[in-house]
Structure formats: C-alpha cells, structure tokens
Amino acid sequence: MAVDDNQQPIEKHVSDAVSAGYDGIEIDAGEGSSLEQALHEFQSPSLAISHISEILQSTTKIIPPEKIGIRFAPFTIVDGDYLSSLLTSYTALIEAIKLDFPVLGFVHFAGARSFDDFEVTVRMSFDTFRAAVAFPDNVNERTSGMRFVSSNNYNPDQAHDLARTGDLVCFGMVADGCPDLVEIMRTRAAYRLAPVLSSRLAKIDGRLRQGKECSIGWDSERAERIADAMNEIDSFLTEFNGHGTTFRKSCWFSCAELGQPLLRAGAEISKFDSEFSEQFTPSPEQQDFETRSSIAYLKRILDSALLTTASAIGIDEILDHCRIYYKLTKHASPDQPIKIPLNPHTNLLTATITNNPGIRVYDFAGAIRKPGLNGTIIMGGTPLYRWSEGKYLPTFHEVIVRTSGSVSIEAVLNFPDKTEVPRPSLGQKGRSFFHDVEQIKEDDRAPMGDLAAVRDIIAERHRLGWATAPKCTSSDLRAAAAFKEVGLGLTIGPAAHRAMPLIDPQIRKIYDSLVTTHADSPGYEKFRQTWFEVVWATGDKAGEVLLDLKALPSGQTTVRRADFLDALVELIPPEIAHFGKRLVELVEERNGIHLGFEDGTSVVADVVVGCDGIRSKVKEFMAPGEYLETLPQYSGMYGYRAVLDMDTMIEAVGEHRARVSTMYVGKGAYGISYPIMRAQKVNVGLYILSNRWDGKDWVRPASKDDMQKDFGYMGKYINSLTRYMPDPTQWAIFDHPPISTYTRSRIAILGDAAHASTPHQGAGAGQAIEDAHVLSELLGDARVTETEHVVEAFKAYDAVRRPRSQRVVTSSKENAYLLCLCLKDVGDDEEKLRETFQQRLRWLWDIDVEEEAERARTIMLENTPSRLMHCIQTD
C-alpha cells in the first residue's frame, strides 16, 4: 500500500494500512505527492534528509523496517526543468537512509512521467542511484539490506533484462489494463489496454483516418485551470516584444522529446533544431514564475493529448524520431475579421488549446464543423498523410479571428527535416519515409502534387472554387413521375437522429425544422423527452399508464412524410434525378452495369445502389437465386390507419391522450397515436393479430362493422377511435425474410429493398438512415477512387449493416406480440413488460453510429489491396 504524507500524521496512515490487512507499505515521495513537494521546498539537502528520517522513524514504530519501502521520482520536472542537483541530492538521501535504516525493505526510483492515458519513458540513467543502494550481485545470497526497485515504462523484454541483473521492477499505468500481468511477463506477450481506453483510441484513429479533427475533452476543474493559464499567457504576450505582424504576436519554445522539459538556451535549441532555432524564444526562465507555470501546465495538457493520439495511430514507437515545439500566439483586435485560408497543417500532428471560436474544419463528407473550446483539438497534417501512404487524411481547416482577438497555444509534432523515418505500424519495417519539409510544402501547393486529389475532393464536397480533378457523376433513377408522399407520419429514433447530420448537416436541419414534438402543444413541454406513454387498453387498469418511455434527448419526433420529402428534394440537383424510369433489366457487363427501363431507354453505370422499396427490382436481379425465398411475407397482423384533426382526436380520447404520443396495449391487438404537423393533426394506427390474409392485394376495403368486430373488446379509447376514423381500409403488414447478402459485385441494396420491417417499433425509416450513413461514409472516403474500391465498400457495408438491420426486422415483429401482451415469457406481466420495453429500445437506440461507420471503414481498408487504398491516384 502506498502512503502519501498529506494533511494527516504519517502514523495514522500506517496504522490504517496495517488495520486493513496490508503486510507492508510504500511511502510515496514520488511525482505529485505532498512529500515530494515538501522535499523540493527545503532550502538545504540536510533538511530534506532530516524530514525523511523523521517519517521513517515514525513508521518503524508501527511496522518493521524490512516491510517498508520509499518511492522517489528524481526526474520530476520542477519549475520547467529537472532539479539541477538531483544526483547529489538523491544520492545523499540514499546514504542517510542506509545509515539509519539498514534493513529497510526497498528504495523505489520511478522514472516514467505519467500523463492522462500513458507514461513517457525518461531517458536518463538510474546507475548512480543503483550504485548508491549497492546490493550484492548474487541476490540469492542476500540476507539483509535494501533492495533497489525501478519503474520506467518498461516493456516485457526490458523488465526481464533488469530482473536478471538483480533489480526489482515495478509497473505503473500499464498494469491497469493487464490484470494478468504476471502471465504477460512470463510469456513476454504484448501489454493490453483497458477496454475504455481501447475504445477511445479507436475513435481517435477513425476520425484521423477520415481527415476529421479530434477533441480531447476537459473536466470542469481542468477547464478552469486552463482558462487561468490562458489568461496569464494573454498578459505575457501583450507585453512580449517578439515575432509577429500588425495583428499577431507569437513566440516559440521547444523541447527535445515529448514529455521532456523545454530547452532553455539558444545553443540547446540549435543542437536540437538548427533550421528553426532563430524563431524560438530561448531562456523561458527569464519569464516570471506565473508565466513559466502556465506554459508548463498547458504544455503538459498538449503533451498528454499528443501522446494519446500517437498511441491511437501507431506512431508511439517512433516518437523518439520526432521533434516537438510550441507556439504561443495572440491575435490583436482587428477592425475586420481576419481569415486564415483553408489548408491542412504541414506537420505530423498539431494539438491546439485556444479561446478562439473561429476554427472551422472542412471534412471529406462535406460537413463543416466547429471543434469548440472545451477540449484539446488534434489535427493530422500532410506529413502524416504521406508517411501513412494515405491511411490518415489531412485535416483541412480555416481560422477566422473576430474583432475580439484570441490567444492560442499549439504543440507541433513533426519528423526532423531531411530524415529517413521508419513505418513500423504499417507493417513496413524495411521501408522508410524520407521527410523533406520544403519539398512537402512545395508539393502541397502544386496543382498536380500528391495532395491535389485530396484538395479536389474537399473542393467538390464543399463546392469550393479550387478543384482541378474531374468530377464524378451520379444519377437518381425513379419509377414515379415525381417525388411524392408514400405513407403518413414518419418517426425517427435517437440513433437515426444522430446519423442524419453525419450524412449531410442539411438533412438534420430540414428534419428539425419540420419536426413535431410534444412541446408543440402548449402546456405539454414536460413531455419533451417522452417517446410514448404505454397505456393499458383493457382490464382492471384500463386507461392507466404502464410506462413512460423516454427517448433521450429528443423525445418523440415526427414529420409528415410528404413535407420531409418535398424539402429533401431541394438538396438534389435536378439534372441527376430522372423520373418515369421503371427498371425491367439489369445486367452486369465488363464495361459497367446495363440498366434497361420500361420506356425503352437504358443507361450504363459503374455501380448501382437499389433503394427501390419492399418490392425491389434491383434485389431481384442482384440475387435471383434467393429472390422467391425473400419476397415480402405476411407478418401475421393487419391494421387500420388514419390522420385525424387534433380537435377530432381530443373529442375522441381527451386532450392528454390526444397530445401525448400513446401506445394502447391489449390482448391480441394494440393502438398507436402521435401528433404530427406541429400538433395540428394526429397519426392513428390500430393493429390486430391475424394468421390469415386472403388475396394478393396488400390493402382491401373494410367497414365500421369490421373495425368494431376487430376491436370491440379493446376498451373505451380504441372503441372511440374506431368511431372517428373515416373510410376504413385494412392494411396487411409485410416484412422481409432475411437475405444472405445486401451486395453482389458492384450492386447493393439499401433500406426497405434490403430489410423491409413492420412498423411496431418505429425503426424502419431509421434503419434506412443508418444504412445511408454507413454507405455514404464508405463511398465518401477519399481513398475510394476505383470501382474495385466500391466493391469492397459494399462488402463492408453488408458486413456491418446486415446483422443489425435484420435483427431489427425480427425485433419489430416480436414487438407486435409484446404490444399485444402475448410475447413468450412476458405476456401481461407488468414488471416484465417494463423491463422488456426498456431493454429493446436501449439496444435499438444506444448505438454509436460513428463507431459503426468506422467499423465498416476498417473492414473495407483491411480487405482492399494496399496498392489501391494506401494512396489517392490522380491519373
């Protein structure tokens, strides 16, 4: 057990440890401990030695000295640098401890510096301290005396080598993710990361592969401390007389390696980086203590973010090949906003802390995002793109400085100039990358350089004016005479709602502008996050609420299909939409896919995505062997549908039931209602289980008597609705049996064409949106430039989307039985109903839609020939 000498007496800590059953203790005088701080504050080594002796003396009164150890961190950075007298100071401490406590258990010297997620190895020798402890060479002959323990972010091989010399080895943060560390040491296997950290690294990796920024967030305490440090930097730069222009001041600092102290003298900087030495501001010790402390604190935050990112993208193995420098910038208050042009950095990675809200990132999906001010912003640069051979796309961004001015600090990680850099994480141990700064900068600007194709994709996706590459074209071929309404209301769950802006921010904007929520009914704002209230339709509790189902954060959101479709049409260039094209033939040939239409026309396409609904002709041609087996099948239920005016609905069921989305559950049948059109109308559906559906038509006329016969036993609410629903017709509910694939070669199917579902959990449209998100991310990847790439994209889309969407089809059908109180093992049991409703919706909604797309991207890249995917072709 580690004991830190903080506010309570050391004896209290030791007694508590013994009472808790610990056999021994380690007194913590390491990095960040209050005891270490006290040691640094003593004016002379003798006072520090005396303080340590007093603590050990108090401790040995409670526990034998051979069961006591003490930990030091001699390489801690204090006031921006290592202690100038660390060797003599800590050697003197060891000698004093040996003299007064000769049988003390051990002295532990910790080298690695701990950051948020990882440790940084200190490249300084422990030999002086090891010699001071001076234990015998043959450990087995040792009967007394202190043992020497070291920790310095050792890998298994290093740990074994040290153990053979007689050292004891300690492990730090790596042990958190490796509960079986002993077995790992025995087999010399690789360390494992904690699952939470692995997931976070995967997200960082995925975003940088897409050319997006990453934001590593801060908690409130850190954010407050960062704000204070930035204010200090602002004051410092205001008085600073250094590099700059009329509107900008900047100064530069450097260090030899990530996590190490800033270089203090011009000569040191020149040795490290002669090319840029004149730009740097040497001797940070010339600044006052508050400024030095603020720079050091912000540097630590930036270093931590870069270390995490380096581990995420696999360059942690070559960090010793990298140089790092820090740029402090203050933009003065201009008369007009200043715009720094759209471009990626010419550095490997850049980490930024800023109070300027004007950073804009232009991604390869056509979205423009604002990273915000609540995290450290990480961006990939063009050297990373080149070193990874296209695996990591550069982050295109612009900076707008408003009239209020701004302050920022950047940490820039890059390879040394004119240097061969290995590529271990790419599996190319024998193939290096030559880093030439000037050549990269020149090529970045060249119209036909390595970056030209990437720039053209950004230009095309964002409709900018500097594209040079030819544009690709697409067509929307539809059987209808025009876009038109199909169906009634449309409800979207939280997962699909999150996916919309990832496809195109305008889609979400349109949806949100048309959406109806409970807040559209005055006085019902408290139901803003309610998806549906589940109400007993029959029985002793008829009319009572069984469950208030929440859909966080959006609640029930619905639009009228026709309104949503009309608005979406405006996003589609009219020249690519062709109507009256009913598909009658689809043949894949060497030169493309031949599509023949009922009107006698035909086209040849490189690839085809069929979104042609539940009776898909594309699916028929794509999978002829399975077509008959996967025709839509009757699901065992039919229903009645209507749209009622809100006033009529209130008259039928009362104001609360009319204005709050409701599911009415009963034996063998259920009803559903939810407001649409800003709560002016209400969508109503009544459904009943029935094993038979006679005839081939999916819709057939019915009468009020039919409705009464079907729902007469379903209680007052449903019976009242049957009286108010006009012109009743019966709608058979069909769904799709599972198909073995959503793609074949250069053809894919999406939405209802692939996985038509019943409406019983409101997920059919949402699944089509999730399909579109994954497929758009894959096809929008800048590395997808050839037909072969699209084939692999389709396969990856199928691998990720088919299992989930087919499970949704099954789950939706089961949900009908749940609502009809006849699902096996649930029935009408109140507690089981509540639990089952919640479990099903959590699975449906609590999915990371970005991670799903990244999983598909990983599959696509793993299965695509590296010669095609590792770089973007410009010819």
Image: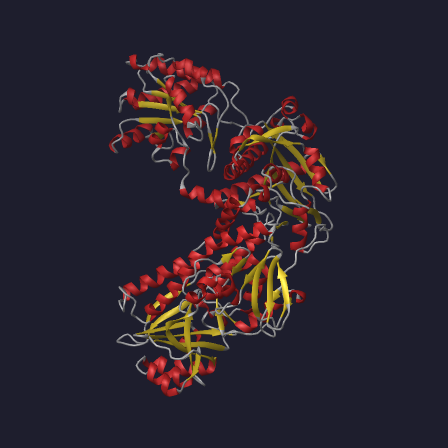
Q: Position of residue 208 (x, y in %)?
A: 56, 44
> Does residue 319 sit above or below 597 in this rendering?
above
In terms of image quadrants, where is residue 692?
A: bottom left
Question: Which of the two residues, 344 or 107, is positioned nearer the viewer here?
Answer: 344
- Residue 549 in the figure: left or right of residue 604: left
In terms of image quadrants, where is residue 630?
A: bottom left
Residue at 41 percent across and 33 percent down: it is 191
Is residue 51 among the parts visible in the rendering?
Answer: no
Question: Which of the two residues, 280 or 48, is positioned nearer the viewer here?
Answer: 280
- Residue 140 in the figure: left or right of residue 284: left
Question: Which of the two residues, 469 or 678, is positioned nearer the viewer here?
Answer: 469
Is residue 203 among the parts visible in the rendering?
Answer: yes
> Does residue 350 sit above or below 791 in this rendering?
above
Q: Position of residue 867 (x, y in %)?
A: 59, 41
> Does residue 497 sit above or below 413 in this rendering?
below
In terms of image quadrants, where is residue 321?
A: top right
Q: Position of residue 199 (x, y in %)?
A: 45, 45
Q: Position of residue 444 (x, y in %)?
A: 69, 41
Count of numbered circles on the image = 0
Q: Quadrant of the N terminus?
A: top left
- Rendered image coloring scheme: secondary structure
